[in-house]
Amino acid sequence: MYQTGHADAADRKSQNDAQLVEAIGPGGPIRERAGMTIVAAMIVAAAAMILVRFGWDGRRACAPLGWVAAAGACIAATLADGAWGLAVVTLTGLVAALAMVLYAGWTSPARPQRPARVAAAIALPRRGSEIVARVAVFVLVVPVAFVAAQWLAFGVQAAARRAGAVETDAVVLTLFLQPIAWAIIIAVQMTRAGPSRMIAAPASAALLGMLFWSVA
């Protein structure tokens, strides 16, 4: 009797497995619903890129709405079909965006030709104040920004060790963070009008590193 009950349970499990395979297999209801979700998400992703394009044209409320719609489409595709669904929907959005960029480039009028001129940024300095300004920019961007980024990386390393990270992970974190922090500091400095305004970025990084040191 025990063997009969065990055999019945095994048969029911086999039937359930077969039904599940049939449901998620090609032509199954689960696969069909996933396919419909993917198609809908692809349409939403393409429409989202159109909204973003409208936002660039001056309708600023459309751009955030488009990004929210694109994120929702990616989430829905991921829930429906995992990484494959996310890849398909992302590719659809990229193709739609590329098509709009190509269309805008094809239809935009050519810019009028202007006479060549020497930009002020590459003109040779003539006065002493200009030379001092160039040297100050170099010092702030190269050694000062490098030291600030290194100090920040050391502070994060100390905090990581304090949190229980092993020595290898802490060293790798430092080697990974330092060039990234340096690049970010330089990028911020390059958007400033003069040397005096370039001091804030490395100073902020150094203060943040000091904060991590104090926590550690």
Image: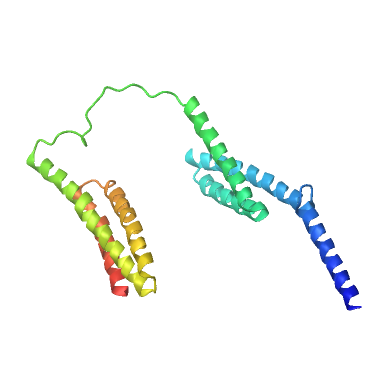
Residue 114 x, y percent position in the rendering: 30, 23
Which residue occupies the foreground of this view, 81 or 104? 81
Which residue occupies the foreground of this view, 183 or 201? 183
Say which residue appears at 32% left-offset and 56% top-offset.
181
Considering only vertical position in the picture, is 68 above or below 58? below
Considering only vertical position in the picture, is 40 above or below 215? above
Which quarter of the figure is the N terminus placed in?
bottom right
Tell me how the rendering is colored: rainbow
Q: Quadrant of residue 112?
A: top left
Task: Describe residue 139's horizontal placement relative to residue 208 as left or right.
Answer: left
Residue 96 x, y percent position in the rendering: 57, 37
Which residue occupies the foreground of this view, 12 or 74? 12
Residue 178 x, y percent position in the rendering: 31, 57
Say which residue appears at 85% left-offset and 70% top-offset.
9
Considering only vertical position in the picture, is 95 above or below 172? above
Task: Describe residue 53's horizontal placement relative to residue 43 as left or right.
Answer: left
Q: Residue furthest left?
A: 128
Task: Describe residue 153's horizontal placement relative to residue 85 as left or right.
Answer: left
Say which residue appears at 46% left-offset and 26% top-offset.
108
Which quarter of the figure is the C terminus placed in?
bottom left
Task: Describe residue 9's horizontal placement relative to residue 207 as left or right.
Answer: right
Q: Is residue 200 visible?
A: no
Q: Residue furthest front?
A: 3
Q: Is residue 92 visible?
A: yes
Q: Quadrant of residue 11?
A: bottom right
Q: How many discs appear?
A: 0
Residue 153 x, y percent position in the rendering: 30, 62
Say which residue appears at 27% left-offset and 58% top-offset.
149
Which residue occupies the foreground of this view, 131 or 159? 159
